[in-house]
Image (cartoon, helix red, strand yellow):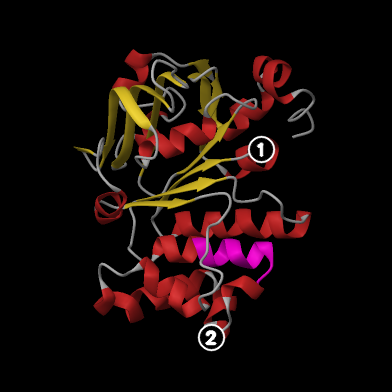
């Protein structure tokens, strides 16, 4: 585990990834990203990140560090003022949401992530509105991961529990066959059992070849399932490493996790 530098990240090869990532396809590269909501006020101040095919990436850090802002900047919801964001080798800065989805970027927000008045089936159809002929094929894919949804397609999304809504939201984002899925606190507001289930489903998504970049307040569990993690602080990637390295690094524990990670 090591502090991050722009030069390291620009090489698209983490110190923590080593040879294991050398032959893996690079999907997402964020370089020296500067972004913010208000003119003259930056939340991200030179953030860097790389993610490879099918890799689960975790982003942790204190409140206000810029974690969710990073996801929103990648998905074009926050003004990017400097740096680069590339997906599959092409810049996506300045693209609109429908263009980002077409380029292979899916985003699942923390709240308001389903259409409550629509059925599960209609929610999924909304997710593939750009490719309606592929609905059956993609439905088979997502119900292979979220099998509970298959027999409940006619149920209204508004009647579902928080965990079930999260499944629908992730399924809808997967309908367009994204290269990368951005997840903003997928376990927020869920019971411990449902939290574990959400993390298991994220792992299943990775096994299907989809890259995930996940922001999580449940730092321990996030780092346990992620290949690599980034610790954001004041809009910068302060540390990066494998999930296990970050869980057990004394500096990360002392500065960001408290006693978290000492039992692993």
Residue 42 disc label: none
Q: Is residue 106 left or right of residue 232?
A: left
Which label's residue is closer to the chain start, 2 or 1? 2
Magenta stretch, residue numbers: 160-169
Q: Is residue 218 left or right of residue 131?
A: right
Is residue 229 at least partly visible in the picture?
no
Q: Residues within 10 Å of mark 1 (few under 14, many from 20)?
A: some
Q: Nearer the viewer, residue 84 or 57?
A: 84
Residue 162 forms part of the magenta stretch: yes
Which residue does the image show at 58% across and 82% down from the upper left? Answer: 155
65 on left or right of 258: left
The image quarter containing residue 61 is top right
Residue 168 versus residue 17 in the image, above or below:
below
Rendered position, 263 above or below 88: above
Q: Which residue is mark 2?
A: 154
Which image quadrant for residue 130? bottom left
**Above or below 130: residue 187:** above
Residue 13 point in image, percent of width and height: 35, 27
Residue 186: image location, x then y, percent? 59, 51
Task: Determine which quarter of the picture holds residue 225.
Answer: top right
Which residue is drawn at the image coordinates 51% and 67% (left, top)? Answer: 115
Residue in view at x 34 percent, y 81 percent: 136
């Amino acid at each position: 585990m090591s502090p991050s530098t722009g030069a390291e990240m620009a090489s698209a090869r983490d110190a923590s990834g080593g040879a294991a990532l050398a032959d893996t396809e690079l999907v997402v590269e964020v370089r020296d990203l500067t972004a913010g909501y208000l003119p003259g006020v930056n939340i991200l101040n030179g953030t860097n990140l790389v993610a490879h095919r099918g890799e689960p990436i975790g982003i942790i850090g204190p409140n206000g560090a810029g974690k969710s802002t990073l996801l929103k900047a990648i998905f074009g919801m926050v003004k990017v003022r400097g740096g680069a964001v590339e997906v599959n080798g092409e810049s996506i800065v300045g693209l609109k949401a429908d263009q980002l989805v077409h380029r292979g970027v899916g985003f699942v927000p923390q709240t308001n992530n389903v259409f409550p008045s629509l059925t599960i089936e209609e929610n999924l159809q909304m997710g593939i509105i750009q490719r309606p002929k592929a609905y059956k094929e993609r439905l088979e894919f997502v119900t292979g991961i979220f099998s509970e949804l298959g027999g409940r397609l006619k149920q209204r999304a508004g009647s579902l529990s928080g965990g079930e809504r999260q499944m629908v939201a992730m399924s809808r984002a997967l309908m367009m066959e994204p290269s990368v899925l951005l997840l903003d606190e997928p376990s927020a507001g869920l019971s411990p059992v449902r939290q574990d289930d959400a993390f298991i489903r994220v792992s299943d998504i990775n096994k299907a070849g989809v890259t995930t970049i996940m922001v999580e307040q449940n730092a321990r569990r996030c780092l346990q399932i992620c290949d690599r993690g980034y610790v954001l602080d004041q809009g910068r990637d302060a540390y990066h490493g494998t999930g296990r390295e970050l869980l057990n690094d004394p500096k990360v524990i002392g500065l960001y996790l408290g006693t978290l990670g000492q039992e692993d």
